[in-house]
Image (cartoon, coloured by chain):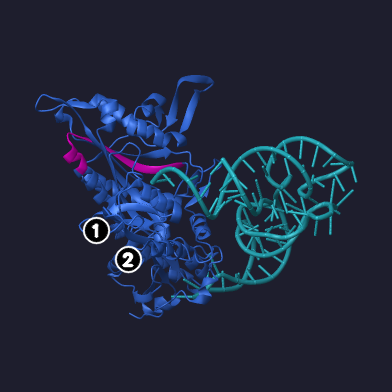
Amino acid sequence: MAIYKGGTPMAKKDKEFVKEITPQSQDYSQWYLDVVQKAQLMDYAPVKGCMVIRPYGYTLWENMKQRLDARIKATGHVNAYFPLFIPESLLQKEAEHVEGFAPEVAWVTHGGNEKLTERLVVRPTSETIICEMYSRWIQSYRDLPVLINQWCNVVRWEKVTRPFLRTSEFLWQEGHTAHCNEEEAEEETLKMLEVYRDYVENDLAVPVVTGRKTEREKFAGALRTYSIEALMSDGKALQAGTSHNLGTHFAEVFDIQYLDRDGELKYVWQTSWGTSTRLIGALIMVHGDDRGMVLPPRVAPVQVIMVPIAPQKDREEVLSKAGAILQELKDAGIRVDMDDRPEYSPGWKFNEWEMKGVPLRLELGPRDLKAGTVVLARRDNGEKEAVPAADGLAERIKQLLEEIQDNMYKKAKKFMDENTRRTDDYEEFKTIIAEKRGFVIAGWCGEDDCEQKIKEETKATIRNIPFHLQDENPGKCLRCRNEAKHLVYFARAY
RNA sequence: CGGGGUGUGGCGCAGUUUGGUAGCGCACUUGGUUUGGGACCAAGGGGUCGCAGGUUCAAAUCCUGUCGCCCCGACCA
């Protein structure tokens, strides 16, 4: 097994090949936009803020969805579908909730040519319509818990949009559960946060910080909100998933009551939790590089791309061998594809598939035919090796895909750790946020005022109050110097 | 919603200052030669210059309005 290209394969001279993508160092934002379009994840639609998720991007989403859906089902939830339209009166019921969403809802006012007697909102989230139904379905403690999830689209009329990170319409899953008491609801809320953490870290190879949101940042209408927060490679944070304990707020206004064992009528405790296509943005910005995307094998639409090198005189022989390997890998359950288009050169294909983030490339040419090998090239670190094209190739590839998945997580975790700093000095804090970015752990008094001022003065927000530091002495508040209540994660965020 | 930028074949741009027959590179089509990190030659096709008004003999170019996209800020998955 010979390694004929390792170390730092992305040599300087190679960079100029990727002429379609703006380098991260030059303009990170433009890099991101170049990647999502050139890799054919999406294209802009004729409606402002809306995008088409193209087949490559949609397959990625399908893979992500499939793995999360399995986890949601494994924890006892079932899928259902609620309507896209919500009567205005339903949205109006929960005061905080309306206030939070009213500025960004899209209204339906006409059916055909006739004006509707009651306007409809296009769901920005489904709490209200689901609560309306739960109030009909729940009568007894025997009806609880209700554990329902739905995969759907939602619409929020955003002023500033960016592909995947913030679009007017996006795809997501939203779980909505009802429980008999606070304890169960809280357990559910935290359980689903943990499902998200496990999913995002293991399947997407994106490390996250779990914790509770502050009052200011919590979901409109929730009692408590928890989140997983990820760090992008430009040092800005991205909320990757949220889980809310809704308390009895919605139950009270939607009259969701059940008769308990003790004969008393009680309000249910509810939760809701969601992750969206925004996770695709996280995937790109956590793992991507100047050559394009780098996708974790577990969700990559194509795990292995075969590039046969087939000059005229060896063409038949190469393609026949390649075809056999393709079938062998498919049979082994690997998502493999072969790019045997004769009109493109191998080098062109290498760059193209690297841009699309395919984790592993398999090259097969006349030289390999003679040596009885294939060349495997890793996207995550650029290493190339020749391995025997014999039995066991599929196993070797599966093992490599696992290694890549693992390495990608470790690399991202290392980056996050190296860019998580701790300080109790506000001036130092400002410098870090302005120059290095990343996460900053600091004490916070718990006052909204301090949180607000820090945001105004530094653009950094409290991402969450992390679980893993809750037993440590928080010291003084970063800004007001009073006793801190918590250690919190600050960052500039998307 | 404020400040800035931008809109010309699919993509990237020139042309706008000083109005006068719309151009370049890439991509695309056809034929041929090629194939281990974005191959080459030849011949082709494709644009009412974002949109709507106006000025003018004449508008990509000047004027007014409007829309989209991008960046920076205030609000959000």
Query: Which residue range is magenta in the image?
Result: A169-186
Q: CA distance from mark 2 to mark 1?
A: 14 Å
Tags 2 and 1 both on a single chain: yes
Name the image quarter holding residue A46: top right
Give the image location of residue B18, x and y in percent. Answer: 84, 54
Q: Nearer the viewer, residue A434 or A120?
A: A434
**Disc 2 secondary structure class:** helix
Residue A26 painted magenta = no
Q: Colour of chain A?
A: blue
Identify the residue under disc 2: A417
Q: Which residue shows up at 45% across the image and 51% down it?
A: A456
Q: Nearer the viewer, residue A361 or A96?
A: A96
Amino acid under label 2? Asp
Q: Earlier in the sequence, mark 2 or mark 1?
A: 2
Q: Which residue shows up at 30% across the image and 52% down it?
A: A445
Name the image quarter holding residue A306: bottom left
Q: Colour of chain B?
A: cyan
Discs 2, 1 touching: Cβ within 8 Å: no
When the figure is inspected, residue A335 is found, relative to residue A404, above or below; the finding is: above
Q: Is residue A425 left or right of residue A180?
A: right
Identify the residue under disc 1: A469
Between marks 2 and 1 in the image, the one whose residue lies nearer the viewer: 1
